[in-house]
């Protein structure tokens, strides 16, 4: 759906502290082949209260229905709690 260049730039944007406080979570096979990712960030709200934003979750079709996305959500939620986010969207 998107070009690899666009995806690489998107990941880099989320990892640059000049842009946002973001994290990219990866799932790998034992061979180290990446089979999925989740991108999360902390966004400022209008009233000055930050919130956690789950931007993207992707799992390769052949790896779906094996709990990978659930693990991503658990890791992202844990990170948001560690960052003391009062709201997650």
Image: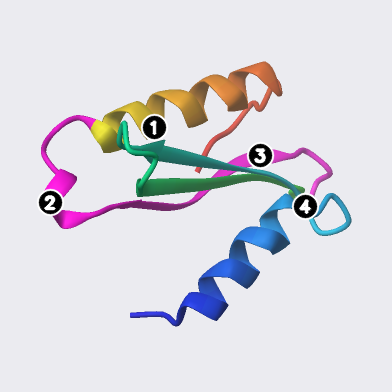
Q: Residues within 10 Å of mark 3 (few under 14, many from 20)?
A: some
Left/right of residue 56 with respect to residue 80 in the rendered view: left
Q: Which mark is residue 41?
A: none
The residue singled out by tag 3 in the image is 51
* Sooner in the amino-acid sequence: mark 1 or mark 4: 4
Labelled pair 1, 2 in contact (Cβ < 8 Å): no
The residue stretch that appears in magenta: 46-67
SS at circle 4: loop
Q: Nearer the viewer, mark 3 or mark 2?
A: 2
The residue singled out by tag 2 in the image is 62
The residue singled out by tag 1 in the image is 73
Labelled pair 4, 3 in contact (Cβ < 8 Å): no
Q: Nearer the viewer, mark 4 or mark 2?
A: 2
Residue at 40 percent across and 24 percent down: it is 74
User: From what the image shows, is residue 3 above or below residue 74?
Assistant: below
User: From what the image shows, is residue 67 above or below residue 17?
Assistant: above
Cα distance between the residues tagged 4 and 3: 12 Å
Q: Quadrant of the N terminus?
A: bottom left
Q: Residues within 10 Å of mark 2 (few under 14, many from 20)?
A: few
Cα distance between the residues tagged 1 and 4: 20 Å
């Amino acid at each position: 759906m998107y070009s690899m260049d666009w995806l690489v730039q998107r990941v880099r944007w989320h990892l640059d502290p000049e842009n946002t406080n973001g994290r990219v979570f990866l799932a790998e096979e034992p061979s180290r082949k990446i089979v999925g990712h989740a991108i999360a960030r902390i966004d400022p709200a209008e009233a000055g209260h930050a919130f956690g934003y789950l931007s993207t979750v992707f799992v390769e079709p052949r790896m779906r229905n094996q709990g990978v996305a659930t693990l991503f959500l658990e890791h992202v939620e844990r990170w948001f709690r560690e960052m003391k986010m009062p709201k997650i969207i």
